[in-house]
Amino acid sequence: MAQRIAALKPLLERVEQAYPDLFGSALAIPYSPFPSVGWSPEAKVRLTATEMKTILAAAYDEIDMAWARFRRGQEIIAAPLPPEGNGPGQALARWVWKLHRIGGGIAPSGEAIRAAGINPNSLEHYGRQEAIAQHYHLTSHTMAPFYVALAIQLAANPQPLRAIRRDCLVPHPLDDNRVMVEWLKRRTGRNPKMQRRSFDPRRPRSAPRLIEMLLEMTEPLIAHAPPDERESLFLIRYPSAAYWRRHDYPAGLIAPDSIPGFINRFIRRTNHRIERWNAAHPARPKPLVPKFTASQLRGSVATEHYVASGGDLRAAGAVLNHASLVTTDRYVEGSAARKLEQETIARLQTLMVAWVSGPDRKEPARHGSVTALFGHRCLAPVEKGGDGNPRLCPRLRGCLACPGLIVPLDVERFARVLQARGHLLAARDQIDPVRWALFYGPSLHVLEHDLLPAFPAGLREQAEHQAALLPDLPDLE
């Protein structure tokens, strides 16, 4: 379609020049009707886990500031006009109260401010209209950290995430302590595909908690947005009535081509704040946020799940909601993934050499029974797969291998997880390294990276005390 428009546009413009009255009125052809067409493809550069954690930490810091400013603004506009004075924030509170009335519930335009007899330059000391608007609703400034954090947590495509709806939170069908996040991924020439991820809303920065904040921060904008966009989550107040905007609607859904600019400003803004911190605290420097794009986040999350699962494309495909592993394979890139694949090839080559060399070369990792983490003995940890090749028994790790594992976040379970982790670490030096990595290493990875971070930090001291009183676990070997 973009190619046909590109060929048709100069013909229409030439006809309009030759016959000005032919169309009845001047043609209004969008400058870029297909914004994503013609972009040069980006190299598949993947962010590391450390870089994504740095990005998330910076996004959470800005979210906390935006949420605190919004809550303070709601308190101001719900109260009577603050009295005049020179106290901290008194002058700003009066401006927030007055401009809220002028704008009819949202940030007023420059024209409305001038019509009320106020010089917009007098707001310079308070961050001008953008900073004051953050007390009323979501803005282009405060939208970016929410978008980035949700893009990482949901592993969503940039454009479907932009169009996520306000009714995206759905109760979990089985667990009352979890919530489903749903959004549509529209595919060219095919029906939209529903995407789903489940989260524990008790975690303060989980995706459902961020979406609840967005619902509250965008509520004042719904009445000022176009009717077909009022069910969208990412509503913002347009900064100006430019010619490509809908002049009769001062708010609406973020434009698809505006996301890169929002993210670049978020990176610059965050790094300036980190540089100031590092200058004031040289003994405790913080890492700068790397430069990234919205399209990098989904592939980076997929690659980290691929590496953490030991090279299992199914684990990454489940996160991305892919029906075909061929599609998932295109997302898995980066040095970490290549390193894992090279190590896997080297290990298989070593096994092949041992097999060719004869029975005198015994591989310690596949012989003998194995003790599962919580007590039972497995006499056949390696079984023959459907293709005739040996593979680990999928039931060896029990519940820890289940993608639907549900663990109540209480002291008792916290104590058992801490005890199991300590038991694995104590046995690591007593077992053959290859054997330990094959049978017991995956369980330790689940405990350290999936279960322990989910427990509240305030329960740790009590859980450690209770773990010391639990009966000893059996020896692994």
Image (cartoon, rainbow, N blue to C red):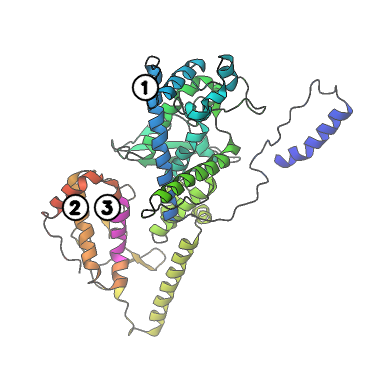
- The amino acid pointed to by label 3 is Cys
Q: Is residue 451 magenta?
A: yes
Locate residue 207, reporting x and y percent.
39, 39
Give whichever of discs 3 and 2 has the lower sequence position: 3
- Identify the mark at residue 399; answer none if there is no mark: 3
Residue at 81% in and 36% down: 10
- Identify the mark at residue 75; answer none if there is no mark: 1
Q: Distance of mark 3 from mark 2, alpha carbons? A: 14 Å
Residue 476 visible in the current orientation: yes
Q: Quadrant of residue 81?
A: top left
Residue at 46% in and 51% down: 288
Q: Which residues are magenta?
A: 438-452
Q: Is residue 157 magenta?
A: no
Locate residue 96, reporting x and y percent.
45, 22
Q: Which residue is mark 2?
A: 416
Residue 212 visible in the current orientation: no
Q: Nearer the viewer, residue 26 or 142?
A: 142
Could you tell me which quadrant the C terminus lies in?
bottom left
Task: Name the dominant secondary structure of the magenta segment.
Answer: helix
Q: Distance of mark 1 from mark 3, alpha carbons? A: 47 Å
Give whichever of discs 1 and 2 has the lower sequence position: 1
Residue at 39% in and 63% down: 386
Q: Nearer the viewer, mark 1 or mark 3?
A: 1
Characterize the local packing of mark 3: few (<14), some (14-19) or many (20 or more) Cα atoms within 10 angstroms: few
Locate residue 438, reporting x and y percent.
32, 67
Give whichever of discs 1 and 3 has the lower sequence position: 1
Q: Nearer the viewer, mark 1 or mark 2?
A: 1
- The amino acid pointed to by label 2 is Arg
Which residue appears farthest toward the right when viewing the image? 18
Report the side of 287 relative to 458 (left or right): right
Q: Secondary structure at mark 3?
A: helix
Characterize the local packing of mark 1: few (<14), some (14-19) or many (20 or more) Cα atoms within 10 angstroms: few
